Amino acid sequence: MKRSIQIHSGIVEGVLEAPPSKSITHRLLIMAALSGHPCRIRRPLHSEDTLVTLQGLQKMGYDFYIHENDFVFTGKHRIPETNAEIHVGNSGTSARFLTALAAIQSFPSYIDGSERMRQRPMQPLISALKRLGTTIEDRDGYLPIKIAGYLAQGCEIDIDASQSSQFLSALLLIAPRLHAGLRLVHHGQVASEPYARMTIALMQKAGIPVRTQQEMVHAPGMKNYLMADSRVEGDYSSAAYFLVAAAITGGSITIRHLTRNSVQGDRAILDILQAAGARVEWHSDGVTVSGGSLKGIDVDMHHYPDLVPTVAVLALFATTPTRLRNVEQLRYKESDRIQAVIENITRLGGHAYLEGNDLVIEPRSLHGARISTFNDHRIAMSFALVGLRVPEVEIENPDCVRKSYPDFWEHFKAVVKTKSRSTSKSE
């Protein structure tokens, strides 16, 4: 039985604490496992995706426990009695990071995922690991895969990161455990490059002297991660939904636990909102966004693909057209997000189309509609915002938000001031 939620019009007002960063949590989990010493990850994100990575680490024999919601690694690692069989669901980050981690184990691993995950690209990472000497049985560059493990040496290697920076990050994270480390050469533009910079910054903070030079990244081998106590900062990707909600409803929201000088690429949402006409103010209690008259924007989204659905919704309530440039990589996400965004905007009576690699949204009068989420958390959360301005918007499969933001609907109800509350349906 599939549940749906009908959204009621309202204004966003109040204060929220940003949930912990999903991207940082994933990376710290891999680093903590490889540190070989006791360490604690404070205020991590507990979501479907991060728990998939945690369960994968458990299958590989890394010892940890949860204490007061923190993830505590003991530094111990046991060899599993049987091969590690890991199901990553729909988590692309887990699939890429655990695949690289499996390559340096002393036992075989089998990694599979959901039907959609089996369609998402893995070939650049698989090819790189094969060139490094790992034996991998794969399905023409897609899951499921079987990895023999035993990779230990390391060397210089080319990596194609034009579809996802996760391929680059996955290799960097295991480099300190290789005898010679890794010298990674990437050609052309790295997709979502800020995520690779996030990986490098976290590694450097943990004592790994990663060096970058033009199209080369070097991470030395035979090093240990030094991270006895790490705290996860607030997530800009998740905060973006409520910042945009305040902007389109003429409300005002303050988000706490966001780091002003964060390495997260999605902090660009603040610049995007300012360019569109919203007011952004930093203060000791966090950042506050207030709504106003909104205008269309022209912005390159190549480095911020996760923001595209949310910014597309912002564009629906602007007075002039919006152009979101270089969105082609959205086809390889949890859904084909280009198709999902255009289809749902069309259902609402709006007009959006692809022009080359740019997504163009032209403001029109909107009406209510049933929103297809395509089981994609970001589609569900982004299009829920439309219902704050447009009556009779219904979101199907709202539980898919558990992938990255399990408390989304609870937070939504807490800050949206409506005449009648959002209601749930079963069908």
Image (tube, rainbow, N blue to C red):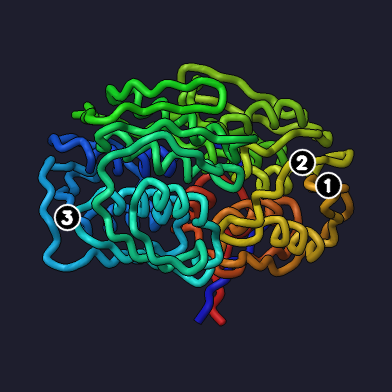
Amino acid type indicated by mark 1: Val
Which residue sits at x=25%, y=62%? 108
Left or right of 13? Residue 44 is left
Name the residue located 76 percent from the left edge and 63 percent from the top edge.
Answer: 343
> Disc 1 and disc 2: Cα gap in Å?
6 Å
* Residues tagged 3 and 2 counted as in contact (Cβ below 8 A): no
Q: Secondary structure at mark 3?
A: loop
Please report whichever mark, 3 or 2, sits nearer to the chain's N-terminal start: 3
Compared with 97, 115 (above or below) is below
**Mark 3 vs mark 2, CA separation in Å:** 44 Å
The amino acid pointed to by label 2 is Leu
| Residue at position x 51%, y 56% in the image | 123
Mark 3, mark 1: which one is toward the viewer? 3
- Looking at the rendered structure, the secondary structure element under dot 2 is strand
Camera-nearest residue between 182 and 368:
182
- Dot 2, how many residues are within 10 Å of its Cα: few (below 14), some (14-19), or many (20+)? many
Q: Which residue is mark 2?
A: 324
Instruction: Residue 303 in the image: state x and y as whole percent.
Output: 62, 36
Q: Which mark is residue 61?
A: 3
Q: Position of residue 200 (x, y in %)?
A: 42, 28
Give the percent coordinates (x, y) of residue 96: 42, 52
Going from N to C along the chain, the mark reached first, 1 or 2, is 2
Disc 1 target residue: 360
**Does the residue at mark 1 contact the one at mark 2 (Cβ under 8 Å)?**
yes
Question: Residue at coordinates 37% horizontally, 61% vertically from top-left?
Answer: 136
